[in-house]
Image (cartoon, rainbow, N blue to C red):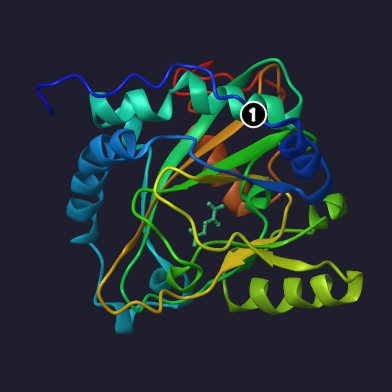
Amino acid sequence: MNSNPLPDLSGEYNLDPVLVQQYQQNGWALVRGLASEDEVAAYRTPITNLTTEHAKNYKPIEERDTYGKAFIQHMNLWLMDEDVRKFTLAKRFAGVAAKLMGVERVRIYHDQALYKEPLGGPTPWHQDQQYWPLDGVKCVTLWMPLVDATQEMGTLNFASGSQSLGYLGPLNISDDSDAQLENQIRDNGFPVVSAGDMKAGDATFHNGWCIHGAPGNASNTTTREVMTIIYFEEGAVISAPDSPQRENDLATWFPGLVAGDKAASEINPLV
Ligand SMILES: O=C(O)CCC(=O)C(=O)O
């Protein structure tokens, strides 16, 4: 652990109301400079240390399936390190999540580091919330690069407006989700918009139902280092899981709770 205290991330971010409108309409928004260069640099160290260690469990990239090639995925880092805890529970980030969703308060579902390695594969189209036993609940994912990330390194693509479709069924991230959701996007005429180049500390926020994916990392030297935090509205109730992935998520992220309970286990702090 770092002996110097890491920067305080509790100060409020002055969110442009236009971004709230964009989020409501398109299902996603790009928030510039949510964390400063110095802040990101400080928190990048513990997040990358944990993720680099975790990456040792992965097979060589050419032996992985499409999901495995897309990124190194390490989850709930906030429970592993006191410094990362400050990042994931930051009031500044949670405040933006709440304002975009139009709710008073939010809880943490989980965090995850998503590191797309040099020449790592594309992230297939998917909907995040199909994994979560939270039907009818407002959920949002914050996605923040910890290094400057160009579009060619794999910043997210969004099917703008696709959150309006809601749950499209249990479609795990795979070649199949990519093909099926590509059809949905085409049939509904949703514009596909890239977040474009992002500086470290910029962040996108996307609705749990917004269809999104990412190109592969075209860089052969630089990893697209990203930290994500998933929030849901306070007061949410757990829905009955209708798929193995939702059963798995219920047991993992709401330990000890069952369908019908308030979604508020000891690892879902109010932030
Ligand atoms: O980082 C990626 O490539 C995908 C991220 C994603 O799907 C998410 O954070 O919901």
On screen, residue 15 versus residue 184, left or right, reads: left
The residue furthest left is: 3
Count neighbours of disc 1 (C-alpha within 10 A) and say few if under 14, some if 14 to 19, many if 20 or more: some
Q: Is residue 238 visible?
A: no
At a point 33% along the width and 26% down the height, the residue shown is 85
At a point 50% along the width and 62% down the height, the residue shown is 197
Residue 149 in the image: x percent, y percent? 41, 61
Residue 25 in the image: x percent, y percent? 84, 46
Query: 27 above or below 98?
Result: below
Q: Is residue 73 visible?
A: yes
Residue 4 in the image: x percent, y percent? 13, 21
At a point 20% along the width and 55% down the height, the residue shown is 52
Amino acid, disc 1? Leu
Q: Which residue in the protein does label 1 denote? A: 15
On screen, residue 231 versus residue 20, left or right, reads: left
Front residue of 18/204: it is 18
At a point 80% along the width and 77% down the height, the residue shown is 183
The residue furthest bottom is: 62
Front residue of 77/36: it is 36
Residue 205 in the image: x percent, y percent? 61, 43
The residue furthest right is: 188
